[in-house]
């Protein structure tokens, strides 16, 4: 009796202490790998490039553009692109796109003064640029072409499946799902997610041994994903949690993309502490700058299986109207 009462009293303190340790671990990783550091490192510089050139893309997309608007961002992008030295092994993906966006902007923007002159001088000598980036003309018909005829059927038929058929998942099908999930929005279009895919029994079992929600079916998972986000993409104190936000959004898009292609999936949470995170990194070669967001079991569902009912709260319990109806 006394022992159980003590446990009830101590348990909240125990959680607080472990939470503090987790906060310290997360902070140490942000200090070590976050994008707040100097941008000489090529991946940090690449993320910095997209953060800036996306400002120019937004400027190019506005119906009404103010005179001289965007030139400050153009100057900032130029400084990032000029940091690449000849010794660097080529421009990053976003740096190449940045050159193209900078060229589009300079061709249509007015003013700019000395910044415009320096941009033109840079563009005369640069050779490597992408065919992607900037803005495209879009029509309402194209937007509505993606409208689902029966969205309730699509969303309500998606369940967390824990009963998979034996056999590998074709990698091309997985790549197709990830390509669809790449349409996920992200802060300043940084796309800082990264997926680690495991298809062999030994690798899957070693990873799942450290995850606490796969008992009873983990040994039959044919494909396991570890979804992560790159800390190097986030460079301000206000973005210290953004890797979890963007990574979580990508994970949900991927689950829906898999469902659209006939694949079943089940999220396997990674609400673990520093000790387990370090242990996972010892058995799976995860980039030190990548934060683990979640795991996901993927496969073809069995012909017949059971799923959790997973009752959903009423809409009124999650929705608050802040304005009176018009």
Image (cartoon, rainbow, N blue to C red):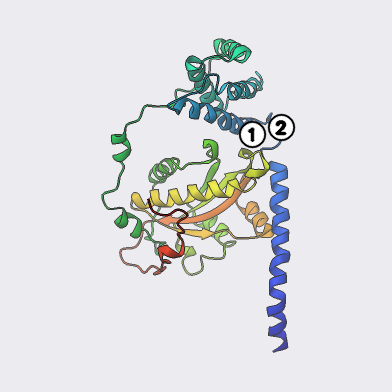
Helix, strand, or loop for circle 1? helix
Q: Residue at x 73, y 65 (%)?
A: 17
Seen in the picture, residue 266 relative to 257 is either above or below; the reply is below
Q: Which mark is residue 38?
A: 2
The reply to whether callout 2 and callout 1 are in contact (CB within 8 Å) is yes
Viewer-proximal residue, 221 or 136?
Answer: 136
Q: Decide if residue 242 is in sight here.
A: yes
Looking at the rendered image, the quarter that the N terminus falls into is bottom right
- Location of residue 202 in the rendering, given as x and y in whole percent from the top left corner: 53, 57
Q: Is residue 322 left or right of residue 287?
A: left
Measured in 3D between alpha carbons, the distance from the residue under mark 2 to the one under mark 1, in whole angstroms, is: 8 Å
Label 2 crowd (10 A; few <14 / some 14-19 / many >=20): few
Viewer-proximal residue, 102 or 112?
Answer: 112
Q: Residue at x 58, y 15 (%)?
A: 112
Q: Which tag, 2 or 1, sits closer to the chain's start?
A: 2
Q: Is residue 303 left or right of residue 128?
A: left
Seen in the picture, residue 230 relative to 119 is either above or below; the reply is below
Viewer-proximal residue, 315 or 260?
Answer: 315
Seen in the picture, residue 5 relative to 290 is either above or below; the reply is below
Which residue does the numbered mark 1 point to in the structure image? Answer: 44
Based on the displayed image, in which of its 4 quarters is residue 321 positioned?
bottom left
């Amino acid at each position: 009796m006394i022992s159980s009462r003590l446990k009830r009293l101590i348990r909240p303190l125990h959680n607080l202490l472990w939470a503090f340790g987790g906060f310290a671990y997360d902070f140490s990783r942000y200090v070590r790998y976050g994008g707040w550091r100097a941008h000489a490192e090529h991946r940090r510089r690449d993320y910095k490039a997209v953060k800036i050139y996306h400002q120019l893309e937004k400027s190019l997309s506005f119906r009404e553009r103010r005179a001289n608007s965007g030139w400050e961002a153009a100057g900032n992008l130029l400084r990032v692109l000029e940091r690449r030295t000849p010794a660097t092994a080529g421009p990053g993906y976003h740096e190449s796109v940045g050159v193209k966006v900078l060229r589009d902007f300079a061709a249509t923007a007015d003013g700019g003064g000395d910044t415009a002159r320096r941009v033109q001088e840079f563009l005369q000598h640069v050779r490597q640029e992408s065919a992607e980036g900037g803005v495209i003309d879009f029509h309402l018909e194209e937007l509505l072409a993606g409208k689902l005829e029966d969205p309730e059927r699509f969303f309500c038929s998606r369940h967390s499946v824990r009963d998979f058929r034996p056999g590998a998942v074709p990698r091309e099908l997985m790549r197709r799902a990830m390509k669809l999930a790449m349409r996920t929005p992200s802060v300043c279009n940084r796309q800082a997610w990264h997926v680690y895919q495991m298809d062999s029994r030994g690798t899957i079992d070693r990873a799942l041994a450290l995850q606490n929600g796969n008992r009873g079916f983990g040994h039959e998972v044919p494909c396991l994903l570890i979804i992560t986000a790159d800390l190097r993409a986030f460079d301000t104190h206000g973005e210290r949690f953004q890797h979890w936000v963007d990574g979580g959004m990508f994970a949900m898009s991927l689950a829906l993309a898999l469902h659209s292609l006939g694949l079943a999936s089940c999220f396997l949470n990674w609400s673990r502490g520093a000790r387990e995170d370090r242990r996972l990194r010892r058995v799976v070669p995860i980039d030190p700058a990548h934060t683990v967001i979640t795991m996901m079991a993927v496969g073809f569902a069995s012909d017949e299986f059971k799923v959790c009912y997973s009752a959903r709260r009423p809409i009124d319990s999650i929705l608050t109207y802040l304005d009176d109806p018009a």
